[in-house]
Image (cartoon, helix red, strand yellow):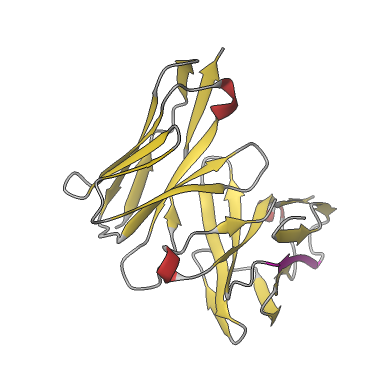
Amino acid sequence: SQKIEQNSEALNIQEGKTATLTCNYTNYSPAYLQWYRQDPGRGPVFLLLIRENEKEKRKERLKVTFDTTLKQSLFHITASQPADSATYLCALDPSGGSYIPTFGRGTSLIVHP
Amino acid sequence: DADVTQTPRNRITKTGKRIMLECSQTKGHDRMYWYRQDPGLGLRLIYYSFDVKDINKGEISDGYSVSRQAQAKFSLSLESAIPNQTALYFCATSPGQSSGNTIYFGEGSWLTVV
């Protein structure tokens, strides 16, 4: 069966450090992978999309990598700030042509001042 | 103003009552979705619609129905609410595959069934 795995344990880091979150998947051949941010009680907000033929994508302090051989995406936030504290969800399109992203359960990031 | 607006934002209802959650969007997207989110279970797709005449069941459609009244409006109904439908519900839209099908979410509707 298709699975998306994100670390269920919260990631705690100190302000100024780089946060790295992982998204692993099995039994998918995604054309793209997305990352979203979700604050408590709010709707997820789209951050970045990376396509299968792209190895890396950057946006300001964010960087996403996509390794289709390892079936893994890494999401990096450099120079992290307490305001970056949130839950981060990865999403990718399933097989079968519906092109509706399926979401992982998310990893909580807590940046300590 | 929000691009995807959900009403009500909070509702407490009794078991067996009918409840409707409404969603409207100003993004001009054809695709609309309803998700529910429960702690530890992530986002699960209830129903989706690719255009006004297209309605499809998602992962967890039992106990729910939807209506796509217009391109901009997509409502979710619980015909006879039960306590395990207590959750945070999100309406969402997307422009389609050409842009990677990025999903734009509303602010959510907290529903408590007692």
**Residue A74 in the image, given as x and y percentages of width and height:** 32, 37
B36 or B16, which is in the foreground? B36
Q: Is B74 situated left or right of B7 in this image?
A: left
* Residue drawn at x 83%, y 55% as measured from the top left: B13
Whether residue B70 is situated above or below residue A4 in the rendered picture: below
Whether residue A82 is situated above or below residue A108 in the rendered picture: above
* Residue drawn at x 75%, y 59% as measured from the top left: B6
Q: Is residue A104 visible?
A: no
Whether residue A20 is situated above or below residue A41 in the rendered picture: above
Q: Is residue B17 visible?
A: yes
Specify the segment rendered in magenta: B18-26
* Residue drawn at x 50%, y 31% as measured from the top left: A108
What residue occupies the far front of the structure in this picture? A60
* Residue drawn at x 45%, y 17% as measured from the top left: A13
**Residue B2 in the image, given as x and y percentages of width and height:** 73, 55
Q: Quadrant of the C terminus of chain A?
A: top right
Please tell me whether residue B62 belongs to the stretch shown in magenta. Answer: no
Please tell me whether residue B22 belongs to the stretch shown in magenta. Answer: yes
Q: Is B104 situated left or right of A13 in this image?
A: right
